[in-house]
Amino acid sequence: MARLPRLAVADQAHLVLLRGHGGDPVFRDDVDRAGFLAALQRACRTDSVALHAYALLSDHVWLLCTPASTRSLARAMQSLGRGFSASFNRRHARSGSVWDGRYRTAVVDRGEYLLSAMVFVDQAPLREGAPSSADAATWSSAAQHVGLEAPVALTDVDAYWALGNTPFDRCTAYRSMLDEPLSVSWVQRLSAAAQRGWAVGSPAFLDALRHSSARAVSPRPRGRPRKA
């Protein structure tokens, strides 16, 4: 079966999944992780992609970002993939692809959907059982979103700004969100959307995408179509 083309929408957030080849580790140490983040920032800056959140796990990476054009994200991910793979292979005296095929992505609606996607990314290390709290994870954007440190240049989304009038208010409100795990249904919905290339949002948002896209934007209902 031919694979569907990716959904790519300018000025709309995208949840991105990068997986290690064959389930192999993507990072062997913190030098690899720091190199990845440096390559990610260069790619986003060069190809006009705003980075909102990230989480580096052992064998995969979650990103939340907004491309300026329909081609921006693809160019940035290609640049990131080539650059990091080359440095990783040189450093570890290996060859071949680091990544398991092409990146996966889901277009995400604004407002509560986008904020939930950001929490989803920031809680990813916690779901893996690594840190004691989401903001304790060294290699995710959670700490930056609660005002602890800022090693990576991030672009805050409107939904985050709406959490409070001051940086302290926003950080406090977001920390409360991080401390409450996303429901299993939300985690499954966002994970499946990214892996299968579906969009996540309100019925009106999905309907608008259907009219502007040449491909399906959400899974079809199961079972036979209802008779008219």
Image (cartoon, grey):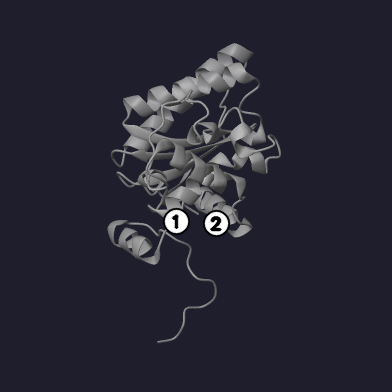
> In the figure, 177 relative to 130: above or below?
below
Residues at marks 2 and 1 touching, judged by CB atoms closer than 8 Å: yes
Real-space Cα separation, disc 2 to disc 1, in angstroms: 8 Å
Q: Is residue 20 visible?
A: no
Q: Left or right of 159: which side holds 178?
A: right
Q: Residue at x 68, y 40 (%)?
A: 128
User: For this rendering, which residue is in front, 83 or 38?
Assistant: 38
Q: Residues within 10 Å of mark 1 (few under 14, many from 20)?
A: many
User: For this rendering, which residue is in front, 215 or 139?
Assistant: 139
Residue 19: give x, y in percent of width and height: 57, 36
Specify the amino acid type for callout 1.
Answer: Val
User: For this rendering, which residue is in front, 154 or 100?
Assistant: 154
> In the figure, 195 relative to 146: above or below?
below
Specify the amino acid type for callout 2.
Answer: Arg
Residue 189 is labelled as 2
Residue 16: give x, y in percent of width and height: 48, 41
Q: What element carries label 2?
A: helix
Q: Left or right of 130: which side holds 168?
A: left
> In the figure, 195 relative to 167: above or below?
below
Q: Residue at x 39, y 26 (%)?
A: 43
Q: How crowded is mark 2: few (under 14 residues within 10 Å), some or many (20 or more)?
A: few
Q: What element carries label 1?
A: loop
Q: Can residue 16 be seen in this view?
A: yes
Ranked by sequence position, the earlier of labels 2 and 1 is 2
Residue 131: give x, y in percent of width and height: 68, 34
Q: Which residue is drawn at 29% across and 62% down?
A: 211
Q: Left or right of 154: which side holds 90?
A: right
Residue 79 is labelled as none
Residue 93: give x, y in percent of width and height: 62, 13
> Circle 1 is placed at which residue position?
200
Q: Which residue is drawn at 42% across and 58% down?
A: 201
Looking at the rendered image, the quarter that the C terminus falls into is bottom left
